[in-house]
Amino acid sequence: MSRAPTAAQRRVIDDAEPVTGRLRGTPAQLAALVKRGLAFRHPRPPHDHFLTPAGHRIREATPAGAETASVAETPAGADTGVFAARVGGEAEAGADGPARVREVHSAWQGLLELRRMTNPDGTADRPCGWERTHLVRAAALALEAAGHRPAGPDTSGGYRVRATPQPEAVAVSAPDAGTLAACAATLEKAGWQTGAHTEPRTRARYLLASPRRR
């Protein structure tokens, strides 16, 4: 087993951009992370450094003894210092307005760049590995970036994205058929495949959405 990163290396990892994993550090720090397989140097100018999947896992690992919280349970406005797309139903949605719009736009553009860098064919029209391991957050970002509004804490008025027992699938609900259809169109444009379903007990309609592979 490889040894844990040094304190200085861990700070560089923790300070990586939330979605793209772009790193900032001294040349020696970045070279050390590359040598350990925690970062890679992009082949195209300006040759920035980015976290590898192993680096992302280290950054997102919960410290021993800490409680684990799912993305769906963490308020998007919580002061975590990390961007979080709104999945709907947050108790505290955080600040709205131009600043939030810019933040969401920046995160979405960063995700598209991550697709271009990590998909084998360099395409940005379908989800990448990061999205497949962060399904709820990735689907919510696609919806919020397209201008859809998340539901409030009472679940009314917008979309909700939740995990499902199915591998590589999230459930998306909305208050009416029109909003649900619009969410489906947005996700399909963003490289997801969707199917409409009905909840047997409540008869509520919802989407199952999965990242497209081709």
Image (cartoon, rainbow, N blue to C red):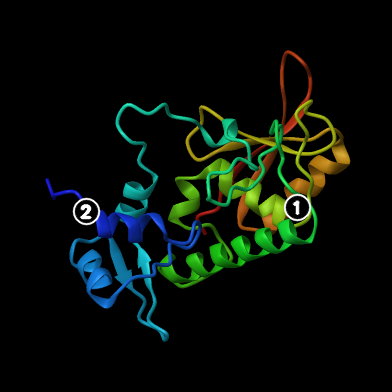
For the point 55% across and 53% down, which residue is it? 212
Work out which quarter of the rendered image holds the N terminus and state it: top left
- Give the structural element (helix, strand or loop) at label 2: loop
What residue does disc 1 label? 185
* Mark 1 or 2, nearer chain start: 2
Question: Callout 1: 10 Å neighbours few (<14), some, many (20+)?
Answer: some
For the point 86% across and 37% down, which residue is it? 177
52 to the left or right of 108? left
For the point 70% across and 57% down, which residue is it? 145
What residue does disc 2 label? 5
- The residue type indicated by label 1 comes to Ala
- Tell which of 18 and 208 is nearer to you: 18
In the picture as drawn, the residue positioned furthest to the bottom comes out as 45
The image shows residue 19 at horizontal and vertical percentages of: 51, 58
Q: Are marks 1 and 2 in contact (CB under 8 Å)?
A: no
Q: Quadrant of residue 126?
A: bottom right
Q: Which mark is residue 96?
A: none
